[in-house]
Image: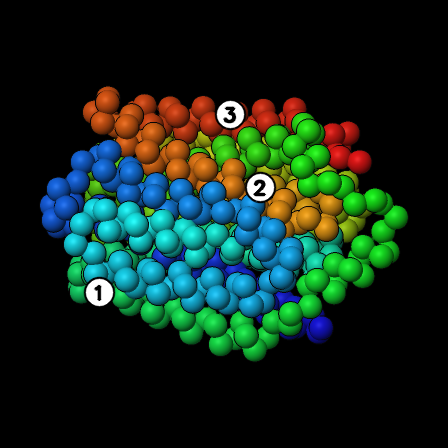
């Protein structure tokens, strides 16, 4: 495979993730629209529940999805899953009750469950260590560009065409992605895995043995903490700026998108910077770990903006904190690929992404409950700070080379 084709597929994987995040985050914009809230008579707890429903099935199916792509490869399972979730997203336009929307969000989670294990498996067997940070950075940038472009586009479509048409346009329009995917990607990752396995002297590691190591639990805890902040921002940030800071739906959607755009930019640059340091002789584990911890620490500055009286300062620190977390984005995923055995990388990615999206269940529900119980966003923001510091501790104490399973 030529270098140009390889990097074109990396960009295609990033675009696939952008589409996935557009389809999963468009509801959070609808939930900030007064006519949507009024039509379904939603409480804060209802909004938290609806934001969380996607992650019930998505998180639950991460490990089974990893087994699926490890067994059958990446190309065709991904294409089938992509088609399914796009049609489900479009079908959200036909709902007439909260229960129907929750059901469709669960189905959307089933469809999208394959995207991360499949993408990271492809990267693991097609991109070398010294370029993997950039590849993962470009791919994971899609997780930030998705909300960055999805929030303002969904807000514009709702304002001009209504929320039902928004779901149809975004759901069906994304199906064109399948054309380059089926054209460019080869169904050969299992053959590449076999070649790498034949060149390794290490005996295969039983998958369940991973859970007896401190390393995997450090990765699980750190991943949950990283994504608690991300999913708080994805599901509640538009409502926070609209309700607590007085921004209009259009402005709050654009600002949310701008914040995630900064995170995508930093994620790509940080992955590239770590790659350059590693290619010049720096230790891969120490380098990627340092970037990861730095990202958590910069993200914790969100608390400064949250409790300032100035709307401008709140917006500035929201951008700084989300963008700063981008230091960790590519590197904490690439760090897992460096430390863990390749033969089970789909399942390992599934474990890590299960932890990631368990945060997607907890963050919107806990935020809605804390806001409903206290009447403000102060308690939810304290929870964000707690999890960011816990993430620092997990990577500093548990994610070490000496805990790599042998």
On screen, residue 230 versus residue 400, left or right, reads: left
Contact, mark 3 vs mark 2 (Cβ under 8 Å): no
Select label 2 or label 1 by which is in front: 2
Residue on which the image places disc 3: 389
Residue on which the image places disc 2: 351
Q: Give the mark nearest the N terminus, 3 or 2.
A: 2
Tell me where residue 26 sits by quadrant. bottom left
Measured as percent of width and height from the top left, residue 85 is found at: 40, 60
Q: Give the mark nearest the N terminus, 3 or 1.
A: 1
Residue on which the image places disc 1: 165
Select label 3 or label 1 by which is in front: 1
Mark seen at residue 24:
none
Residue 78 vertical placement versus 376 (above, below): below
Q: Residues within 10 Å of mark 2 (few under 14, many from 20)?
A: many
**How far is disc 2 from disc 1 in space, using C-alphas?**
35 Å
- At mark 1, the secondary structure is helix
* Residue shown at 25% from the left, 40% from the top: 47
Pick the quarter of the image with the N terminus. Answer: bottom right
Residue 335 vertical placement versus 172 (above, below): above
Select label 3 or label 2 by which is in front: 2
On screen, residue 281 versus residue 147, left or right, reads: right
* Residue shown at 68% from the left, 63% from the top: 189
**How far is disc 3 from disc 1 in space, using C-alphas?**
41 Å
Pick the quarter of the image with the C terminus. Answer: top right
Measured as percent of width and height from the top left, residue 77 is found at: 54, 63
Q: Residues within 10 Å of mark 1 (few under 14, many from 20)?
A: some
């Amino acid at each position: 495979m030529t270098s140009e084709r390889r990097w074109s597929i990396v960009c295609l994987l990033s675009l696939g993730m952008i589409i996935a995040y557009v389809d999963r985050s468009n509801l959070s914009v609808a939930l900030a629209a007064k006519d949507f809230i009024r039509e379904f008579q939603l409480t804060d707890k209802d909004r938290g529940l609806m934001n969380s429903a996607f992650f019930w099935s998505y998180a639950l199916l991460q490990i089974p999805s990893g087994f699926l792509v490890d067994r059958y490869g990446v190309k065709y399972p991904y294409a089938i899953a992509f088609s399914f979730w796009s049609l489900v997203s479009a079908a959200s336009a036909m709902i007439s009750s909260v229960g129907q929307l929750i059901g469709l969000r669960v189905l959307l989670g089933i469809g999208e469950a394959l995207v991360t294990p499949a993408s990271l498996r492809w990267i693991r067997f097609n991109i070398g260590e010294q370029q993997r940070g950039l590849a993962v950075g470009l791919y994971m940038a899609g997780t930030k560009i998705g909300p960055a472009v999805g929030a303002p586009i969904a807000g514009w479509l709702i304002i001009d065409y209504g929320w039902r048409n928004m779901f149809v346009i975004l759901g069906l329009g994304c199906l064109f992605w399948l054309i380059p995917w089926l054209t460019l990607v080869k169904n050969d990752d299992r053959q590449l895995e076999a070649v790498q396995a034949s060149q390794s002297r290490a005996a295969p590691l039983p998958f369940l043995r991973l859970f007896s190591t401190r390393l995997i639990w450090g990765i699980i805890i750190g991943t949950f903490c990283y994504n608690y902040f991300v999913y708080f921002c994805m599901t509640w940030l538009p409502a926070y700026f609209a309700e607590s800071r007085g921004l209009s739906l259009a402005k709050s959607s654009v600002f949310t998108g701008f914040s995630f755009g900064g995170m995508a930019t930093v994620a790509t640059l940080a992955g590239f910077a770590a790659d350059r340091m590693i290619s010049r002789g720096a230790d891969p584990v120490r380098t990627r770990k340092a970037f990861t911890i730095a990202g958590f620490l910069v993200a914790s500055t969100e608390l400064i903006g949250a409790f300032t009286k100035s709307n401008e300062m709140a917006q500035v620190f929201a951008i700084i904190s989300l963008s700063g977390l981008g230091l960790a984005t590519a590197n904490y995923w690439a760090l897992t690929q460096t430390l863990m055995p390749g033969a089970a990388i789909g399942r390992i990615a599934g474990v890590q992404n299960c932890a990631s999206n368990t945060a997607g269940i907890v963050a919107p529900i806990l935020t809605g409950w804390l806001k409903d119980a206290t009447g403000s966003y102060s308690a939810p923001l304290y929870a964000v700070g707690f999890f960011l510091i816990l993430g620092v501790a997990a990577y500093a104490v548990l994610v070490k080379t000496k805990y790599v399973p042998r």
